[in-house]
Amino acid sequence: MTRSSGNVFADLKVPNAEVKHTKVGLAVTINRILKEKGLRQQAAAKLLALNQPKISALANYQLEGFSVERLLRSLNALGRDVEIVIRPQQQSKRKGVILVRTA
């Protein structure tokens, strides 16, 4: 067994692992909110200013066509504030990380 870094994409050596990990974290939150609100894909598309195929892609975590910025704007459209905190690394010998947390 190998201990996970917390980013499955990095563990699998997938290119752009940090971006993919960030997008998935944001998409999980968006999909959870859409489910909580009981929004169908057409209503979600209208609210998020996306077309229905994009909502379907988001629901299925096919995130190639989404930028982090677009996902952040979607959270704003769903009535969520997004706060970005920049701080020094906790350990100076490791690479910086991007972390998505929901409140």
Image: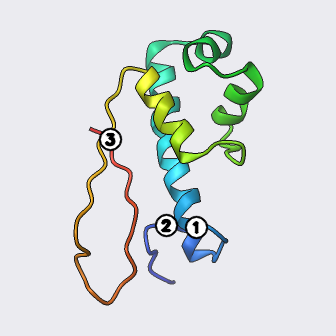
Q: In this view, does 32 lie above or below 69?
A: above
User: Which amino acid is tagged 3?
Assistant: Thr
Q: What residue type is labelled 2?
A: Asn
Quadrant of residue 41 within the rendered picture: top right
Q: Tell me residue 31's x, y (percent).
A: 53, 30
First in residue order: circle 1 vs circle 2: 2
Q: What element carries label 2?
A: loop
Determine the residue positioned at 40% across, 62% down. 98
Left or right, 98 with reference to 10: left
Where does label 3 land, which residue? 102
| Front-lying residue, 87 or 22 | 87
Q: Which residue is denoted by mark 1 in the rendering?
A: 17
Q: Residue at x 54, y 49 (%)?
A: 23
User: Sequence order check: which comes first, mark 1 or mark 3?
Assistant: 1
The dot on residue 7 is 2
- As drawn, is 51 to the left or to the right of 81? right
- The 10 Å Cα crowd at callout 1, few under 14, some 14 to 19, many 20 or more, is some
Q: How far apart are the two marked residues, 2 and 3, measured between alpha carbons?
A: 17 Å
